[in-house]
Amino acid sequence: MMLLFGAMVHSQENGSDDADQPAERSNGVVYVVQVEGLVDNGLFRYIERGINLAEEDEAIGLVLHMDTFGGLVDAADKIRKVLLDTDIPTMTFIDRNAASAGALISFATDIIYMAPGSSIGAATVVDGGGGTADEKMQSYMRGLMRSTAEATGRNARIAEAMVDERIAIDGVTEEGSLVTLSTSEALEFEMIEGTAATLELALDSVGWGNAEVVFVQETTNERILRFLANPVMSSMLMLMMLGGLYFELQSPGVGFPGAMATMGAILFFAPLYIMGFAQPWEIIVFFLGVVLIIVEIFVLPGFGIPGILGISMVLFSLVVSMIGNVGFEFPALEHMGRAIWTMAITLILGILMLFSLGKYLPQNRMFSRLVLVDSTSKEQGYTSSDSKDSLMGKEGVAVTALRPAGIALIDDERIDVVSQGDFIENGARVVVVNTTSSRVMVKRLTS
């Protein structure tokens, strides 16, 4: 959106201006950050970068231009904290929606303006399956909404009622209904400071209309990282890892399944690591778990402690890497719900995928070129070498000394043979007693 009221407008990406800085900023500078789509950890990094840029530039204000239906509680909590910690005046302009996590983020700013027809509220926490999360998580979210509203001078009870439908407030809501406020209702109950049809008018209303406006653009790298770190994409990448690992272990060797598992691991961990959410120890735990699984399968056949420990380490590392923590700090339990649900759904989808692939892929001509699907058993006529069973019981003559291996002439054909362990001299008569394992075993013929 371009500003048309005389302010100097430019965008900033990667921390550098695309337009020349003015000689003086007599009216100050205001930074604008777009809050759109899913509230996730990638959005947190983007908003945090915008705050840092505004602080470095000594801006007179930071604006969140918001239109979101919510997202991850842990990401919203991180955004809330950095907004409350900054000394720069902050404002949210709600342009249509500030639902769920969006409401929490809005309450963390000093000023809120809403466009006509917008709404704010409905902040009940839901689990990965779309149902209402447990009471512990709801209590945590109520606490966040209450403390945030109190910190910015808003009605904490109404903020709590956006999470808990059991809360009844005279003139606002009855028990059994979550609070979602329209623009006029939010203004009436003093949850916002004003209304404005456009961002330009909102800036003008708070005295920032003549300031230089800097739009903090989301960089290409941030967009890619945010796409890969999306919970849906994370689930698909985990399917790539687990499915590829399973098929690779079924037909050992560095092949297509192994390459798919490796690519899935790189695409899963790389964006989380770059954004600072996946710690090095979490990645190390994942690969140690894979090593233990391989050891269990190829070195210690059976299913014992290494296999159980390896699977546990792989699943644990995947869960904690989706949460985000600092150093060796263990993730807060209230933040683990979404990651656990994502993992559970992934495992269910993975089992269904393996069942479907195991049933239908062997019939696919392209798949048969990548993975050996046909049995090569002896009953189907496959052997690792020519059968010697026809020589069983036949007699011959040792043409070399057998020490115990040597050569015997059987049916006028020179055959590599081995004695049962005793020395047989050249010219002695022998008889074939065993032809298993593609080996012709003979013994001295005594009569």
Image (tube, rainbow, N blue to C red):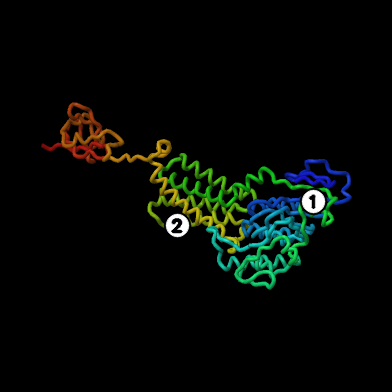
Q: Residue at x 26, y 35 (%)?
A: 405
Q: Residue at x 61, y 50 (%)?
A: 272
Q: Quadrant of residue 411?
A: top left
- Placement of the C terminus among the 4 image quadrants: top left
Residue tagged 1: 200
Q: In this orientation, does residue 330 appear?
A: no
Q: Is residue 250 left or right of residue 289?
A: left
Q: Position of residue 262 (x, y in %)?
A: 52, 44
Q: Position of residue 103 (x, y in %)?
A: 68, 60
Q: Is residue 422 left or right of residue 90?
A: left
| Label 1 crowd bin: few (<14), some (14–19), many (20+), radius 10 Å | some
Q: Tags 2 and 1 in contact by the CB under 8 Å rule?
A: no
* SS label for mark 1: helix
Residue tagged 2: 308
Q: Position of residue 206 (x, y in %)?
A: 82, 57
Give the amino acid type for the residue marked by disc 1 in the picture.
Glu
| Label 2 crowd bin: few (<14), some (14–19), many (20+), radius 10 Å | some
Q: Residue at x 23, y 34 (%)?
A: 388
Residue closest to the eye, 147 or 211: 211
Circle on res. 143: none
